[in-house]
Image (cartoon, rainbow, N blue to C red):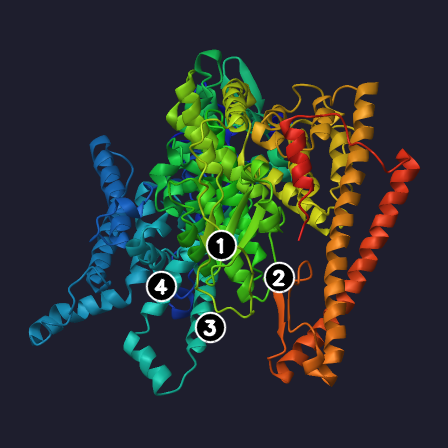
Amino acid sequence: MENNRIFFDFRQTDYSDAAVCNDSELVNKVQMEKMMELIEEQVQKSKNFKLPESNKIEKQQHVHNTISIFGNRGAGKTTFLQTSLYLISQKYEKDAVLLKVLDPSLLDCKQHPFISIIASIHELVEECINKDYLNRGNISKTDKDKYDSSYKKLLKGLPFIDGVGSANSYQDWDDDLYVSMQGMEKAEASNNLIDNFIEYVYDALKVLNKKCFIIPFDDIDTNINKGFEILEVIRKYLITEQIITILTGDLDLYSKLVRKASWESFSKDFLEKECNYSKRNPDEFSHMINHLENQYLLKVLKPEYRIHLKTIREVIESGESIIGVYINDYSFADISVCYQYILDKIGFKTENIRVTNQIIYFWEGLSIRTQMRLLKLLSNYHDERHNDKNNFTHEFINIFWNDIKQKSLNAKSLVNDDKYYPVEMMKFLIDTKSLSDCSDFMPHTNDDILNKALLAISAQFTKQVNKSGFMIFDYWVRVCYMKYVLESFKVDDTTNILDEIVKFSSVLEHDDITKCIGLVEAYSRSKYKSQSLPYKTMPGTMIIDENVARNNNSFGKYLDLISHGTIDQSNNLIRYVSIYKLFAVIRDCLFNSLKYGIREGLNKRRNNTLIIKKIAQFRGYLEPTIFETKYNYSYDSEKYNLLNDDLLRDDDVIWDSITCNFIEWKKDSLKIFSSLGNVTPQLLNRIFTRTYFTMINIDKDSSYVNIGQKFNAYIIAFLNSVLVEWSFEKSQIKGLIIDNSGSIEYTFKNNISLIKEGDCVLLEWLINCPLIKLFIDPVYYLIIKKYNRLDDERNKLVELFTKRTFYYRIHTLHEKLDIYNKLSDNLMNILNWSELFQFNRKEIGQQQWLFSLEPLEDGIMYLDVNMSNNLIFQKIDKMSVMLEQVGLSIYNIKQEIESAESYFSKRFGNMKYELDDIDDFNNNFYKYLCSIKIR
């Protein structure tokens, strides 16, 4: 069992350079055993080798027994090679001669590899002969003479090797004497070059009193110019059993070297003529190259002599070894535990086993070189004197700086602190075309370089969030929201759309994102209409009646915190309320309060009030004209002044109160975030995703009939997502409801009762935000603030909330029924009018009709007796169809009212009910929101 243990000891070395490993440090022990078995096999064959006789058949027996060591860059190939060469030198000192490792990157660009090999052998032989002469050794004169003779024969054939001799070896053949005396002799030497080399090796070994040469090549695949040339040397010349060739590299890169050389054998002119004139299919040549590549590699690098180095992950999963790390004199741990330490230092909660295992699995599959750098970083910061997480994160990111640079156009902004860091994150996702898959910045793609960059960016963001809470909302809006907006368009390729929407909305500029989100909505509205979906909205967004929203000016301006509008080319305005607008407002308020500073004093408070009012004000944004509209869309609305005219009122007590509360909340957040930690993009992405899909279920629920209760549900869905996902970061809370399909108010009420104060700091911070609190039912807010109490007071609040919920719903349904009844009466009247119109137009008392078609559809119905009969009866036919739709809606609403009133009377008794005795701004504002029906 001890032999199966691997220890990395950072007390002794930092593993920054390739070096001989002792047995306890060798990752690929099984592969090393195979390596030594192959060496043993070939050394034994070299001992039995004899020079062939002169018959031709025997002379043609050549061997290709190159031992190839394959692995990706940084997989430890050089370390493995050096260790194996050390073991070989110890075991086969009497039989083998180790030549220096041939690294093509160290070869002179004009030097042929075959010449380098011959020179290395000759140097060793000459050195041996000189030593023997001085020591009067036992090298016979016959052996020396044979060596000299074979060496000279070999040299005569070398000029005919490509790249060694002159371009035209026959340029002097016009001289008869030259041809007869020297030319033919050289030609013969060239023809017998391989045999002469085999003989030369044999004679050299005899002088050295050895059985074989071992020639190692390291990473020849990384040199495009020399790589294939060395492969050709191995294929043509190193084919004797007295030469053991060892080769390292990446099999994929060797494949590319062979393919490149194969393609170059076909000239461009030849390929064009074959395809254009001979009408050859280009695929024919591609198949030919595939075949040549396969056969070449099977011949030169035989599969039975290939050694594939494993990653640390593969070694662990195979059960071959257990890997531990000596971090310092006091700390030793399994490598997976070390990676948990690293995760904790870069901001990930290691209690989330799923996320932790995913990242550790990724790290263990990285190159050994990269893993050594990570473990060395941990060893440097694993004591109290060096426990600065910010510096640790900075050095962690530097390990992956080059990966970020390969994937990003602006790597510098991604490795440094930046208050607009989410902008850089979004740019990175766009550059790498990975928004839909990588918005959580987790390493789950098939691209390891991208994975490393994503994780490094995640660490940098997490480090900055602790000092800049506004980045949480910034990330939700710039990244998560944009991702789901694109998905809402239901198109196969969103690349062009993403470019358009980014340019139109300025979401990647250093601007307030409240404006950006309004422009995104305007773009989306135009796109939806081009897809014949004029009333489509994102989950978390509702279209509301502009006139109703403005009926009560004392509350209407506070509705602006969550509302904005879009204006079409006919200057018609649609007004929305959106939870994403609220996120944007909170982000901008937090960001600008940092920018302008917060100090005591009336003037400073008024300045901050003005900032918040400017950020929150209602704006309408023009829809772009980049799409061809497929739907005849109109919306009759009063023309709206895009900017509020009351921004500078100093006597607005409510705004001043909101500002003061927000400033206090911002101050508290500075204390909270110092201990918050662990707010990663992965966590925030999960929160947003859970919120988004919960809001889809809310939109499908017909029981939400006014924006007050529905927006309250949106907020509760958001807070519940924070609670659930945060709990996954620690441990699974017993009894936690994670199903989003039921009543979200009940779900959150249950879930929050299961935690204790301090269990979910992020949730507590968000619940206390005055801008979020403003849109929560005040009674429900009291319930969740007493989440850790199960007393009578809380039970009474739950009862009161249920009563209010049904009362508001019933009240809104009655108002909705009145509107449908009014529309039904108008439709009935106009149909009766049409019957009289058919018989005697002159006797009709009412000459014109004008009424709104809401809530069935936008616009108005206009009829005039002076219209053509054809036009009038077209409209009458439309009225008949609408009357059926209105009748069905009236029936359904009555059923809903009956059901709700029945439940109310059974549980609470008389419907004559005063809601509650709460009389404050939040409660009155919530009542106002509940008076606005959902369109």
* Amino acid type indicated by mark 4: Lys
Say which label, 3 or 1, has the lower sequence index.
3
Pointers 4 and 1 in contact (C-beta within 8 Å): no
Pointers 3 and 2 in contact (C-beta within 8 Å): no
Horizontal relation, residue 168 to residue 833: left or right = left
Specify the quadrant of the image occupied by residue 725.
top right
* Amino acid type indicated by mark 3: His
Q: Which residue is mark 1?
A: 639
CA gap between label 3 and label 1 equals 68 Å
Pointers 2 and 1 in contact (C-beta within 8 Å): no
Q: Could you tell me which residue is drawn at 83 percent across and 29 percent down? A: 799
Say which label, 2 or 1, has the lower sequence index.
1
Specify the quadrant of the image occupied by residue 654.
top right
> Between 160 and 830, which is closer to the camera in this rendering?
830
Q: Position of residue 847 (x, y in %)?
A: 64, 74
> Between 368 and 789, which is closer to the camera in this rendering?
789
Q: Which residue is mark 3?
A: 287
Say which label, 4 or 3, has the lower sequence index.
4
Q: Which residue is mark 4?
A: 260
* Amino acid type indicated by mark 1: Lys
Q: Residues within 10 Å of mark 3 (few under 14, many from 20)?
A: few
